[in-house]
Image (cartoon, rainbow, N blue to C red):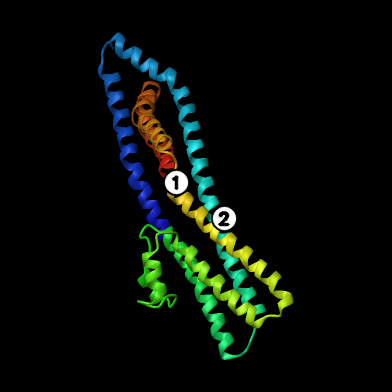
Amino acid sequence: TLVSGGFLALVDAVAPVASLSVAVACVACTMIESAQRPSVQLTMAFAACEKIFPLCTTCVTFSLGFFLSTSYARWWKLRDLAGSVLGRTIDTMVMICTYLNGVGEHEREGRRKLARYLLLAHAISLQAGHQSGYRFEKLVELGLLDKDSSEHRALEQATTARYNIAYQWFLSSFYSQLTSGVDIVARGNIMFLVQANVSHMRGGSADIMMYLGEKIPHPITFSAHAITTLYCALLMPVALASQMRWHAAPLAFVVASFFYGLRSAA
């Protein structure tokens, strides 16, 4: 469904420009063939389009290549950060089950509480990056948060990144259970490992928010959009019509779909 939806969105974005490119190519061919003796101005206009066509193709290719590589690099970095946060979340949960391994009901309840805080922080960081924003009712539904509890109110009223609050709750609870259930010799190393994981998870979540909040600068996106649109809708079909006549129409559709499709995908 996601792939088909993305493909349909891409077709919707490309179809108008590709159709306009075909229409311009047909109009240009009609103008060329209907003129018994083309005027000097018309001849010079088509000749100019032919001459600057290779240069403009190079400019469009460079602009789209830069724009596409930038977009891909951002997407890959987001993917890497999300995977790192998830991996360290699982790693921390393994540490909890390894070092806080008591079999009593109190110890089990303590591990469940730590797991809830850890998953709560991860879920909040995922929600923070979603377009719909925070949905605390979903967290209640998943059993990560009690409705109308002090934790629920604290998260609703928070003015800072809410996953930081959940990570603080986790560390506080973990330290309390560690000091009461683990030998004093091993506490320092265990706390250091868990603290390092939490710092990486919190930092990774903050970096994800930074990438999502700081979009590619508008001048870059506008330039790529304007250059590609002018090339696909005007210059390219006219230049092809001057060289290839009616063969230019289908070729203009293919070229416009390719270049504008790359821009839309980026």
User: Which residue is pictured at 36% across the width and 52% down the height?
Assistant: 8
Element type at marker 1? Answer: loop
User: Which residue is pictured at 33% across the width and 37% down the height?
Assistant: 17
Residue 236 x/y as whole percent:
39, 27
Sequence-wise, which precedes: disc 2 or disc 1?
A: 2
Q: Which mark is residue 80?
A: 2
Type of the residue with mark 1: Glu
Residue 148 x/y as whole percent:
35, 76
Q: Which mark is residue 112?
A: none
Whether residue 166 is situated above or below residue 243 in the rendered picture: below
Extreme residue toward the bottom, this view: 104
Q: Residues within 10 Å of mark 1 (few under 14, many from 20)?
A: few
User: Which residue is pictured at 37% across the width and 67% down the height?
Assistant: 156
Whether residue 158 is situated above or below residue 215 in the rendered picture: below
Viewer-closest of 8 and 164: 164
The quadrant in which the C terminus is found is: top left
Which residue position holds label 1?
Answer: 214
